[in-house]
Amino acid sequence: MSIKISDHLFDGVPCTIYQKEDSKTKPLIYFFHGFTGNKDANIMGRGEVLAELGFCVVAIDAYLHGQRMSILERHRSNIDKYQDIIEIVIHTAQDAKRLFDKYFKYMPNIQPEVYYAYGVSMGSLTAFYLATIDEALKAMVGLVCTPSFVEYYRDKASLYGFNTGFFYERKLAWYQPIDPMNQLDKLKHKRIFMGIGIHDDVVNPKYAKNLHELLPETILKSYETGHVSTPEMLEDSYRFLKLEVFHD
């Protein structure tokens, strides 16, 4: 059976939807890409695979990414953009929640009660945050992932030499209470798969390990890789979703 791929614009948010061309009602799964990526270049075949599993896959451009990138943003360095990475995550997650509540749950081919998320790198943090603000998100996959706002941002600020003055401290004060690492009461009700690279020098594996120590019911698997998804990591993530969603 063929996979239908279609482009849409919902409230100014560009989306690409992947789904089998049949009449079955499908669970929705969001695909969230990584930093400086976009919904099309960074999905890398996963849209078709997830659609074959039985999902309606909605890949969206993160805030200030892809088709949502302004001219001003295009001329900023990646280090400058990194200073806004948590705001990008928050905005994107809020977009996803709103679009599900406003549009997707009312579509006749989509299950209205719950949905799922699949995030890579920055996209994993989007999924973690979304899990803390929406009870309808039932399970998620995070690859080369981080669930941390504050410690992750502190590490990046130290690495790249962000301003450590008033605005930096104000950002951290805002992030602290909404950090997924400080919302464990909400995450413990979700089914979570985390795949990490033991040689990852972009997103330190320690953040996922810390969450797993606090919530041992999460699934954490380590792979002989850096900041990339291996075939084994992908297969494990698909197997997790098949068991959680389709009970295969």
Image: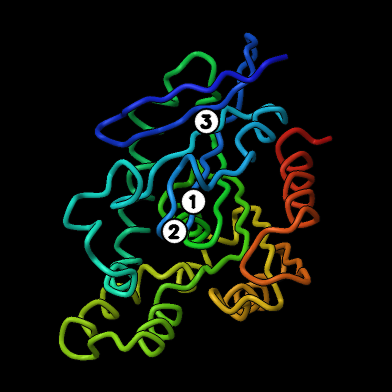
Q: CA distance from mark 1 to mark 2?
A: 14 Å
Query: Which numbered dot is residue 91?
Result: none
Q: Nearer the viewer, mark 1 or mark 2?
A: 1
Q: Is residue 41 left or right of residue 157?
A: right
Q: CA distance from mark 2 to mark 3?
A: 19 Å
Query: Which numbered dot is residue 129?
Result: 2
Q: Nearer the viewer, mark 1 or mark 3?
A: 1
Among all residues in the image, which is located at the extreme front?
75
Q: Quadrant of the N terminus?
A: top right
- Name the N-terminal-most of marks 2 and 3: 3
Query: Of the residues shown, which amino acid type is indicated by label 2?
Result: Tyr
Q: Is residue 131 left or right of residue 157?
A: right
Q: Residue 3 at x, y = what percent?
A: 63, 20
Residue nearer the viewer, 15 or 227: 227
- Name the N-terminal-most of marks 1 and 2: 1
Residue nearer the viewer, 227 or 217: 227
Cβ atoms under marks 2 and 3 closer than 8 Å: no
Q: Residue 215 at x, y = what percent?
A: 65, 70
Q: Residue at x 16, y 57 (%)?
A: 72
Q: Answer with the quarter of the image where residue 178 lies.
A: bottom left
The residue where tag 1 is placed is 33
Q: Residue at x 41, y 70 (%)?
A: 179
Query: Of the residues shown, which amino acid type is indicated by label 3?
Result: Glu
Q: Residue at x 22, y 58 (%)?
A: 73
Q: Is residue 173 left or right of residue 176?
A: left
Query: Which numbered dot is residue 113?
Result: 3
Q: Residue at x 61, y 81 (%)?
A: 206
Q: Residue 79 at x, y = what percent?
A: 32, 75
Query: Of the residues shown, which amino acid type is indicated by label 1?
Result: His
Q: CA distance from mark 1 to mark 3?
A: 24 Å
